[in-house]
Image (cartoon, rainbow, N blue to C red):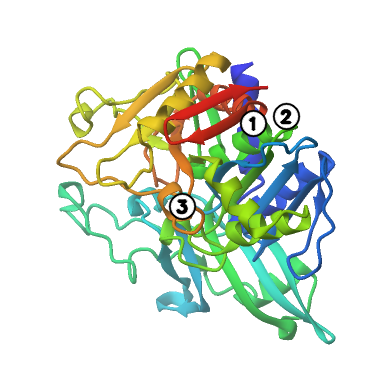
Amino acid sequence: MFEKTSKNVIEFISKCPSCFHAVNELSKMLDEAGFTHLKECEKWDLKRGGKYYTTRNGSSIIAFNIGEKLDNYHFQITSSHSDSPNLKIKERAEIKGKGDYVKLNTEVYGGMISSTWLDRPLSIAGRVLVKDGNTICSKLLKFDRDLVLIPNLAIHLNREVNNGMKYSNQTDMLPLFSAGECDSYDELIANELGVDKEDILSKDLYLYPRTQASIWGAKKEFISSARLDDLQCAYTSLTAFINANNEHAVNVYSCFDNEEVGSGTKQGALSTFLYDVLQRLNTGLGFTNEDYYTAVAKSFMVSCDNAHAVHPNHPEKTDAENCTYLNKGIVIKFSANQKYTTDAISASVFIEICNRANAPVQKFVNHSDIAGGSTLGNLSSQKVSMHTVDIGLPQLSMHSAYETAGVKDSKYMIDALTEFYNTNLLITDSEQIVFSK
């Protein structure tokens, strides 16, 4: 069962080379599960017992399953993110150099480990905006073949490369595209989409690694893939959401774009997206504004974003006691400076959920001399404040082009979050939380 779940994760990630493809695949999963797609720009007709989802920018998605018996109306929410660090192709993409070489002009998106993108087969994916008569249409683009590569400088030309290398984003991270013998970049895109080059107006295109995901290890203990952070959580939390049912609450699934660059966009966790959806949901069900505020006060969010496992070669980089390992279960993340929103209340709730699901739990706190990253929970709570726990799945090589996790942990996450969505959490005040079905 562990390996089967990990294979499902791999299959999902392989279909998601960009945030736009990720939301497209998440939408397909919801469609197959009987959810109704609502457009933000249209009026919503909502009913108790209904299952709905909406998207923003084609790169963020929120789904909700409305209970039939909302006698103690509240929300139970998970959040994850659809984006990963990568290289975005600039608008004027082609750079012609010596010997007819053609490179692509790129800029870094997020905090990537630059060296992991070199000497690796790469391709291009994202969205293209195309004119069609009086309409501008967004089209998904994925070149499903090895298309570009960023070559390393040979050690003979850089004798200090193994003594530490500082990569120039403007010079070292430009992929080789052509030897000058193929159609132009825009013509290649037009041919792939079956449109005229003149009708292409703009693009959001990124490089993505082509190295195939795998399950490996002496006993197949490990899973490696691009974009585990955070598509592993995006997939497992949606699977749990679809599997579960809670008659007494509104279960909500959210997956936001732009977490890797601070979430401060119209579709990020710092935007009004979640607030807007919950407000429209509240109104659509006939509740008052006062009902909304009391519902939020009784609600709970699980912020799902992967966590650092102890590195086998560098255990000194993690706290001596509060550290995590692959295949040892879900990670609850703590931070005194509130980079993670977990406190004793939210941790206790989630520990009890995991105990009920027989899912092992680990606790992570950063090494006190090493600043950690932030995640979704503390950002989304600035717009919709509620009890929140920050969790994730343990992994190695976070923000590498090829990351590694444990083969068991995806199933643990599905089991725990299914239990979370199935359990009616009755939060009466800051010190009392009652569990019921």
Q: Which three-letter amino acid code belongs to the residue tagged 3?
A: Ser
C-alpha distance separating marks 1 and 3: 19 Å
Query: Vertical placement of 98 versus 278: above or below?
Result: below
Report whether 320 appears left or right of 117.
Answer: left
Which residue is identified by label 3? 381
Say which residue appears at 22% left-offset and 46% top-offset: 371
Q: Earlier in the sequence, mark 1 or mark 3?
A: 3
Question: Is residue 226 in view from this perspective?
Answer: no
Question: Is residue 335 in view from this perspective?
Answer: yes
Q: Nearer the viewer, residue 108 or 252?
A: 252
Give the mark toward the camera: 2 or 1: 1
Query: Vertical placement of 354 versus 125: above or below?
Result: above
Q: Which three-letter amino acid code belongs to the residue tagged 1?
A: Tyr
SS class of the residue under badge 2? helix
Which residue is identified by label 2? 243
Quick one: label 2, few (<14), some, or many (20+) residues within 10 Å?
some
Which residue is identified by label 1? 421
Give the mark toward the camera: 3 or 2: 3
Tell me the quadrant of the picture where the C terminus can be found.
top right
Q: Nearer the viewer, residue 199 or 280?
A: 280
Q: Nearer the viewer, residue 336 or 400?
A: 336
Q: Position of residue 70 (x, y in %)?
A: 73, 38
Q: Which three-letter amino acid code belongs to the residue tagged 2?
A: Asn
Label number found at residue 200? none
Q: Nearer the viewer, residue 80 or 423?
A: 423
Q: Quadrant of residue 243?
A: top right
Say which residue appears at 65% left-offset and 21% top-offset: 4
**Pointer 2 with pointer 1, Cβ within 8 A:** yes
SS class of the residue under badge 3? loop
The tally of labels here is 3
Report whether 413 appears left or right of 379.
Answer: right
Q: Position of residue 255 (x, y in %)?
A: 59, 50
